[in-house]
Image (cartoon, rainbow, N blue to C red):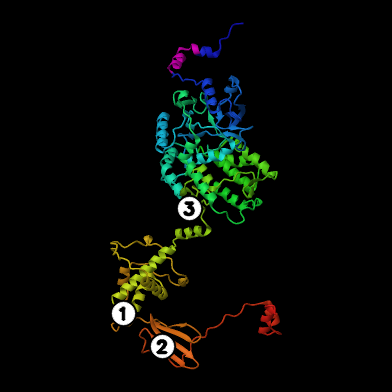
């Protein structure tokens, strides 16, 4: 049987195909460096350390991990399947509640990612070595110790401070250092979100670290890598996304790596140094203890805030609708936070959360389920009735993130929170607005004038009236001018003049009138009193100069324009005021001993009140209908019913 030459060999025998293959550029194939892998692992977890570390690999969206002791031998079989190593060590498995040793501090940058709105970062095209120099200069300018080493991960940059090993109970201290180092989510202009409570220590910290936080933000700092269970890519491994080798970027030799004291790093980034904190605690210990302080508080039962978590779930979904999509680098954080809010409000399981949220975040179902593994285990503990006591309260085992923490993880700025109408998920450590403050802010957005501005406008109107009085105008003319310029009543005008007379004098600054009249679309809406409801609204507020020009000129005999009909006001049971024009009228007193007395005011001497005039009778409001009173009215008097009602 003749030999059949394989088709691919026949393909290579063709000279044209050989020429095309020779013209193609040679692409280097990255090969793992096992010596570098062992050196990196032993640098983080030297022999003799307590606890276990984790070597993991990521395939099809899942992390496959294996735990090793610090004394275990790492051969070729163990290293060939490893891509990541845990920064900290654990007691049995990689979980936040099983920390055995902490101490290292890290930063992870991804300049090729997107910001919260899906835009490219400014340092995307900068070489990785130049980006490291830029970040190292920013860290040195902030007064922080230099990182022990820098790693080029293949698609990003890692900065790691190697510190002494601390026990697992020091996890909260490490968390505070990472929170201060990563910083809050900055506003769009790079400023730090404002706080409602004054804190000089935090103000000094923000002024010192704000330039560093801005540089970190522009370099693509991954804000979702602050958890103590974080794994980092190992030196010498191949990054499958870029096909490049993860390598040590700085220093060039392992022997040049310097370790750092964790207290020195904490003093550089926290608001208070360790010595200042201990001194403040000593002062607090000398203060007298409050009453009943020796009594141990009883743990209160957990009151599930279902309505609060439902609103947070709605805000997380509203944030996605506002952005249009969740940016790359924040999809896992959004899925995890939304699933936690769903579990708090409605329950469910891991499969339900992944099926609902994976399409919204743009993640494969397996990858979304992988990032919800710890939440699924905690949900099972919650369904079993387990609670966690913290202080004087008992909480369920689920995660209880604050709105500020969720905003930091998702990169929500103050402007975006206002635009999307977010109340809970807001940046910074500020206190949420109260219901009264939110309603006041909404009224201002709808066109209402704040109380302080109304007081200033009233004071200016009163000063204008006093100026008219100083020019020789009568009180009625000054009041009429204020009414014409501000569209308010006589009582308001009189109160304004009284307040202006009692207020300290102020220098008057003349403002030139505009050369062009404003268009109707430019006129701001005027808020007026409820007395005009159902009638005509007053004219818009005018400047004092224009108001004087529009004030009607009084007649030659110095008399003001009378009202179409006299205004009658009942002052008391025996006193009635009749006002014929602004500030002009009479007061009638009806007394059984003195008879009728007519007292004019405002120069009303020539007005005669007819004898047949009788003041209006002040009628009492009829009592509300009561079935019991109607039933007893036929046989019970009013006094008897009142006594029966009071229990006599």
Q: Secondary structure at mark 1?
A: loop
Q: Residue sitting at 28 percent across and 82 percent down?
A: 556
Q: Could you tell me how far apart the alpha carbons at marks 3 and 1 are, in whole angstroms?
A: 56 Å
The quadrant of the rendering that contains the C terminus is: bottom right
Outermost residue, top side? 1
Q: Is residue 171 magenta?
A: no
Callout 3 touching callout 2 (CB < 8 Å)? no
The quadrant of the rendering that contains the N terminus is: top right
Q: Secondary structure at mark 2?
A: strand
In depth, the one of 119 and 297 nearer the eye is 297
The image position of residue 514, as x and y in percent, is 29, 62
Q: Residue sitting at 43 percent across and 84 percent down?
A: 578
| N-terminal label among 2 and 1 | 1
In depth, the one of 602 and 348 nearer the eye is 602
List the residue tagged with mark 2.
599
Callout 2 touching callout 1 (CB < 8 Å)? no
List the residue tagged with mark 1.
554
The image position of residue 347, as x and y in percent, is 65, 46
Q: Is residue 92 left or right of residue 36?
A: right
Q: Secondary structure at mark 3?
A: loop
Q: Is residue 613 above or below residue 548?
A: below
Q: Is residue 500 above or below residue 278?
A: below
Q: Is residue 645 left or right of residue 87?
A: right
* 10 Å crowding of disc 2: few (<14), some (14-19), many (20+): few
Give the magenta part as a residue range: 12-23
The image position of residue 5, as x and y in percent, is 56, 10
């Amino acid at each position: 049987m003749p030999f059949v030459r394989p088709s691919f060999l026949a393909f290579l025998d063709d000279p044209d195909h050989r020429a095309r293959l020779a013209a193609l550029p040679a692409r280097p194939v990255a090969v793992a460096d096992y010596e570098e892998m062992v050196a990196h692992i032993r640098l983080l977890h030297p022999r003799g350390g307590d606890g276990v570390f984790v070597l993991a690999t990521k395939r099809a969206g899942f992390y496959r991990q294996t735990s090793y002791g610090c004394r275990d031998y790492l051969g070729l079989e163990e290293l060939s399947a490893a891509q990541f190593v845990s920064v900290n060590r654990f007691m049995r498995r990689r979980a936040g509640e099983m920390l055995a040793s902490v101490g290292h501090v890290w930063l992870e940058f991804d300049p090729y990612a997107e910001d919260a709105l899906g835009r490219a970062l400014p340092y995307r095209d900068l070489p990785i070595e130049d980006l490291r120099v830029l970040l190292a200069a920013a860290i040195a300018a902030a007064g922080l110790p230099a990182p022990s080493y820098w790693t080029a991960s293949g698609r990003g940059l890692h900065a790691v401070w190697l510190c002494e090993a601390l026990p697992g109970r020091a996890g909260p201290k490490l968390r505070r250092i990472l929170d201060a180092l990563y910083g809050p989510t900055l506003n769009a202009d790079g400023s730090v979100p404002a706080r409602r409570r004054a804190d000089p220590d935090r103000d000094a910290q923000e002024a010192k670290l704000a330039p560093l936080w801005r540089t970190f933000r522009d370099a693509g700092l991954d804000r979702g890598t602050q958890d103590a269970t974080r794994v980092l890519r190992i030196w010498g491994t191949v990054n499958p996304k870029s096909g490049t080798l993860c390598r040590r970027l700085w220093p060039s030799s392992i022997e040049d790596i310097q370790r750092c004291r964790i207290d020195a790093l904490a003093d550089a980034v926290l608001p208070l140094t360790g010595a200042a904190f201990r001194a403040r605690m000593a002062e607090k210990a000398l203060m007298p203890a409050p009453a009943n302080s020796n009594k141990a508080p009883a743990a209160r039962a957990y009151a599930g805030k279902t309505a609060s978590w439902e609103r947070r779930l709605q805000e997380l979904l509203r944030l996605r609708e506002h952005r249009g999509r969740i940016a790359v680098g924040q999809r896992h954080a959004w899925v995890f936070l939304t699933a936690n809010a769903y579990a708090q409000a409605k329950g469910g399981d891991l499969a339900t959360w992944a099926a609902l949220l994976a399409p919204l975040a743009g993640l494969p179902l397996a990858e979304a389920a992988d990032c919800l593994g710890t939440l699924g285990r905690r949900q099972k503990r919650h369904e079993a009735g387990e609670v966690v006591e913290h202080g004087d309260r008992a909480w369920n085992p689920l995660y209880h993130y604050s709105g500020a923490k969720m905003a930091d993880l998702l990169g929500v700025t103050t402007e975006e929170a206002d635009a999307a109408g977010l109340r809970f998920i807001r940046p910074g450590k500020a206190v949420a607005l109260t219901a009264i403050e939110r309603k006041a802010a909404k009224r201002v957005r709808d066109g209402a004038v704040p109380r302080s501005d109304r007081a200033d406008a009233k004071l200016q109107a009163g000063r204008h009236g006093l100026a008219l009085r100083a020019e020789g105008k009568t009180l009625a003319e000054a009041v009429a001018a204020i009414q014409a310029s501000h569209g308010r009543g006589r009582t308001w005008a009189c109160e304004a003049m009284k307040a202006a007379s009692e207020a300290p004098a102020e220098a008057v600054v003349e403002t030139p009138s505009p050369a062009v009249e404003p268009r109707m679309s430019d006129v701001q809406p005027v808020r007026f009193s409820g007395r005009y409801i159902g009638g005509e609204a007053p004219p818009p507020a005018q400047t004092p100069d224009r108001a004087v020009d529009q004030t009607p000129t009084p007649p030659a005999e110095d008399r003001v324009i009378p009202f179409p009909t006299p205004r009658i006001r009942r002052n008391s049971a025996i006193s009635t005021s009749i006002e014929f024009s602004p500030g002009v009228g009479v007061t009638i007193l009806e007394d059984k001993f003195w008879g009728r007395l007519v007292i004019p005011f405002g120069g009303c001497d020539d007005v005669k009140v007819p004898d047949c005039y009788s003041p209006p009778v002040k009628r009492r409001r009829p009592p509300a209908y009561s079935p019991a009173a109607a039933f007893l009215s036929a046989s019970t008097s009013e006094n008897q019913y009142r006594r029966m009602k009071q229990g006599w």
